[in-house]
Image (spheres, rainbow, N blue to C red):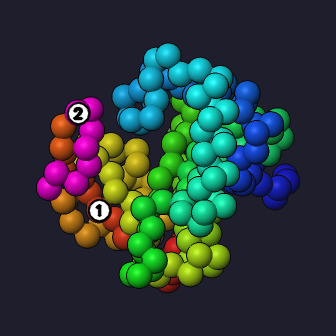
Amino acid sequence: MSDAPKYIVRRLELSDAGAFYSAVRESIDELVYWMPWCSKDYTPLDAENWIKTTMQLWAADAEYPLGIFDAVSGAVIGGTGVNHINRAYRIGNIGYWVSSQHTGQGVARFAAHHSALLGFSQLGLTRLEIVVLTHNKASQRVAESLGAKLECEARNRLYFQGKPHNALVYSLVPGDLR
């Protein structure tokens, strides 16, 4: 049995645009529901523009989007990263999504763990939040599997499908990581 990782988490490159587009299209029905950036008419140009945006965000030290890749095939299977950074308070947010055919396999946990390591080790953050809609049970399980602590249900915390919604706020500090 091999101990080689099944997944790789790294910065996106322009050469990943086609694979990123394929992952989004394969999961379009689920992503349209959860992700405000996704629409039924998502195009290859949208994928390319997103990757260019990720490069700009990294260059500006503003946000740190990452791709999730199958270690064997190199296919894009999702995204993660650290965003909503407040440098004065050394806090940020972790987000993640996984293509439909790869859900339930530990991909989101693996990727979110890598984002947390980036936040704590490389960015010097001391607190990371994972903010989850109250009905998103899968994301709640990911947060809990990382060792994140549920702090509260925050009223009107996320704007979702055109309306404010309550969300659960989980926190991670460096000692929490499992």
Of residues 105 and 25, the one nearer the viewer is 25
Q: Secondary structure at mark 2?
A: loop
Asked whether residue 12 is drawn in magenta, I would say no
Within 10 Å of disc 1 (Cα), the crowding (few <14, some 14-19, many 20+) is many
Q: Position of residue 103 (x, y in %)?
A: 54, 37
Question: Which of marks 1 and 2 precedes in the sequence?
Answer: 2
Q: Position of residue 155 (x, y in %)?
A: 14, 55
Going 63% across and 53% down the picture, which residue do you hit?
56
Tell me the residue at 47%/53% (across/down). 95
Q: Residue at x 19, y 59 (%)?
A: 153
Per the image, the residue denoted by label 2 is 162
Answer whether residue 149 is visible to the viewer in this image: yes
145 left or right, relative to 165: right
Could you tell whether 132 is left or right of 174 in the image?
A: left
153 in relation to 175, above or below: above
Q: Residue at x 64, y 25 (%)?
A: 45
Q: Residues within 10 Å of mark 2 (few under 14, many from 20)?
A: few
Provide the major secondary structure of the magenta segment. Answer: strand
Q: Nearer the viewer, mark 2 or mark 1?
A: 2
Q: Viewed as shown, does residue 18 lie left or right of 95?
A: right
- Tell me which segment is drawn in magenta: 155-162
Marker disc for residue 78: none
Q: Which residue is mark 1?
A: 169
For the C terminus, which image quadrant? Answer: bottom right
Residue 9 relative to residue 28: left or right: right
- Front residue of this view, candidates 63 and 136: 63
Q: What is the residue that sits farthest to the left in this orientation? A: 155
